[in-house]
Image (tube, helix red, strand yellow):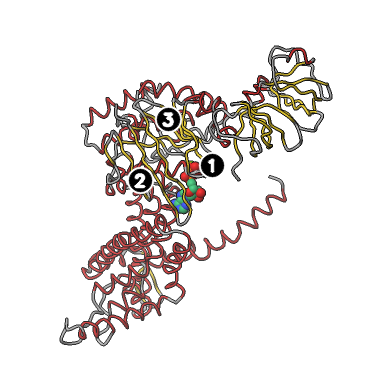
Amino acid sequence: MTPDLDCLDLTRRFGDHTAVDHVNFSVAPGTFFSILGPSGCGKTTIMRMIAGFLEPSSGDIRIRGASVLDTPPNKRPVNMVFQHLALFPMMSIAENIGYGLRRRGMAKAEIARKVDEALERIGLPGIGNRKVTELSGGQKQRVAIARCMVLEPDVLLLDEPLGALDLKLREHMKVELKALQAAFDTTFVYITHDQSEALVMSDQIAVMNNGRFEQVGTGQDLYYRPETPFVAGFIGEANRWRGRVERTEGDELRLRTESGLEMRGAAHGRALQAGDRVEVFVRPESIRIAGDAAALAGFDNVLEGAVSNILFNGAASRALVTDDAGEEIEVTLPQSGEFSDLKRGDRVHVGWSGAQGNAFAVTA
Amino acid sequence: MSSANRIGFVLLLTPLVLWLGLLIIIPHIDMFLVSIRERVGRGVYETSAAQYLTFINEPLYIWTFVRTAVMSVLATALTLLIAFPVSYYIAKMARGRLQQVLFMLCLIPFYVSELVRTFGWMILLRETGLVSNLLQWAGLADQPVEMLYNDAAIMIGLVYTSMLFMVVPLVTTLESLDDSVVEAGYDLGGNGLSVLREIVIPHAMPGIVAGCIVVFMLSLGNYLTPTMLGGKDSLWFTEMIYNQFIVRFNWELGAAFGFMLLLLSSLIVWGVLKLTGRTLQETLG
Ligand SMILES: Nc1ncnc2c1ncn2[C@@H]1O[C@H](COP(=O)(O)OP(=O)(O)O)[C@@H](O)[C@H]1O
Ligand SMILES: [Mg+2]
């Protein structure tokens, strides 16, 4: 099956700054594809090149197999939901949604029917005559999507569309967007700097940093099998240590951190040798905490230390444990209640399996 | 309201009331009273509509009146046509320094007085002027060309004088138009023309209406430009008012003319606001 969208060696420079650097990806039909990266990494630049508002410095963009580089934005079979939605304030909701259809020269009655249908689809029937300013943030969001979807684009581009919403609504809209994508059965390319948005909604996520794609994969891939230190640090939380490889045993590593803590880690297929400088990432949620060492017998990394702080955050509560060498370790507290009375200064044991210690060579 | 507040309020309001009262309302009332009286003997006046009847019964007066109105409307339309692309460029396409420089360029002509500015045009357009010489040098004319003292010269002068008053409100409203709204217009299939018609112009409407009203009033009440560029017989209504007051010493007729002009400008402004479905508050606020 031809992918809906193909970007080949896409590059964009602004002066001597390369905002997008040889990016390659393809999006299969019906996929919810996210580009996730910190602010300023070049996400919007990619989006604007796909929509046609920016010319790539080099590379190609193909939609359903055909290059669109010579197609102006108003003729491309993609539509865009802008960062601040960009609804037309001078038009009613119905006129906003019907705008693209009017431009295509569709008959009035047909437009009215399609607009009603779209309003029904987004769960806002009968608001066609209202003004844009009369809608709430979430409603505007849905209207902005409907305005694009009536045109039945091959690909819908969304540039941080939830950025302007408050937290509660954002949580709600995540679920809703995913449902809308399924309902319209269209390929979505979604930009965000918020990993939870990307993880919850996407079929495929590309993690972007400094104009390059670090890794493309499912949420699980990125979370459990990060391929670069940036991805390991960016997706989810992680304890992060720098150190040196002491010994390798196949995929297993023995490491010593800069502060002298000894631990086991795993190379997960990456070529690492004794003496290499490495960075190790261990997720707080893969570390077990226990009152006595016996409960942690199955783990090959076991430490003893004192609780230096409790970060209470409901289900995501953590404890900071300082081991006797002075290294601080962040540990997720289990929700079974056995640690609900843990306090600062308590002696505890923590343990994790060596395979959870994801080690990457430090290049610099 | 506490008494301290009240004193502050009165103090703040006083200059405004004085200004409105002394400079606008009282003179106008007085002018109206002057316009409805007729001199029947030495120092003896009677209330009558004679002045207004004179105005209506003299074709030259009516003709000048209509001509002034039509030319002013035309000048306003021309100014809008020229200022819109200029403003769009300044507000939406020029960036940073260029934007400031362009805006300054629009402003600089207003650093010199209107008189000097109009003389500038005379130097360019007169028989021995720059344009005439240039045409002869290029072989496009075989004798000096007089380009002053006609309606085209008046029009050039009026448009030139009014430009800034159109550019400023237009730039202000166009700047507030979000770039992404324009992009969305293209993204959803619009072309340049439809984006202009459906998105840019509706958004700029308050600026267009405000600019047009100001330019129209300025043109209608302009005295210097029509007189200098159009010559003695340019048939501009303000000239006629001036003549009645200063040359003929016929204050009664001059006052009546003045009132007709006030009526005309109010009527046209009201008509434009009605036509565009706006209120004065919206346009000014
Ligand atoms: N028109 C432009 N001119 C110059 N630099 C730009 C332009 N647009 C974006 N950039 C630069 O490109 C980089 C990426 O920007 P952008 O794609 O907007 O990032 P993101 O959307 O990921 O936050 C930034 O460093 C930004 O300063
Ligand atoms: Mg962005």
| Closer-to-camera residue (A202/A232) | A232
**Can you give x and y, in whole percent of width and height, for residue A57 in the image?**
38, 51
Mark toward the start of the polypeptide (2 vs 3): 3
SS class, disc 2: strand
To which residue does mark 1 refer? A39
| Closer-to-camera residue (B52/A101) | A101
Q: In which quarter of the image is residue A51?
A: top left
**Can you give x and y, in whole percent of width and height, for residue B24 in the image?**
48, 63
Mark toward the start of the polypeptide (1 vs 2): 1
Q: Work out whether residue A215 can be spotted.
A: yes
To which residue does mark 2 refer? A59
Classed neighbour count for the residue bearing mark 1: other residues with Cα under 10 Å, few (<14), some (14–19), many (≥20): few
What numbered label is drawn on residue A33? 3
Classed neighbour count for the residue bearing mark 2: other residues with Cα under 10 Å, few (<14), some (14–19), many (≥20): some
Q: Quadrant of residue B63?
A: bottom left
Nearest-to-viewer mark from 1 and 2: 2
To which chain does the residue with label 3 belong? A
| Residue type for callout 1 | Ser
- Give the Cα separation between the discs numbered 1 and 2: 23 Å
- Give the Cα separation between the discs numbered 1 and 3: 18 Å
SS class, disc 1: loop
Asked if disc 1 and disc 2 are in contact, CB closer than 8 Å, the reply is no
**Can you give x and y, in whole percent of width and height, for residue A342 in the image?**
79, 19
**Quarter containing the N terminus of chain A:** top left
| Residue type for callout 3 | Phe
- Answer yes or no: disc 1 within 8 Å of ligand 1: yes
- Give the Cα separation between the discs numbered 2 and 3: 20 Å
To which chain does the residue with label 2 belong? A
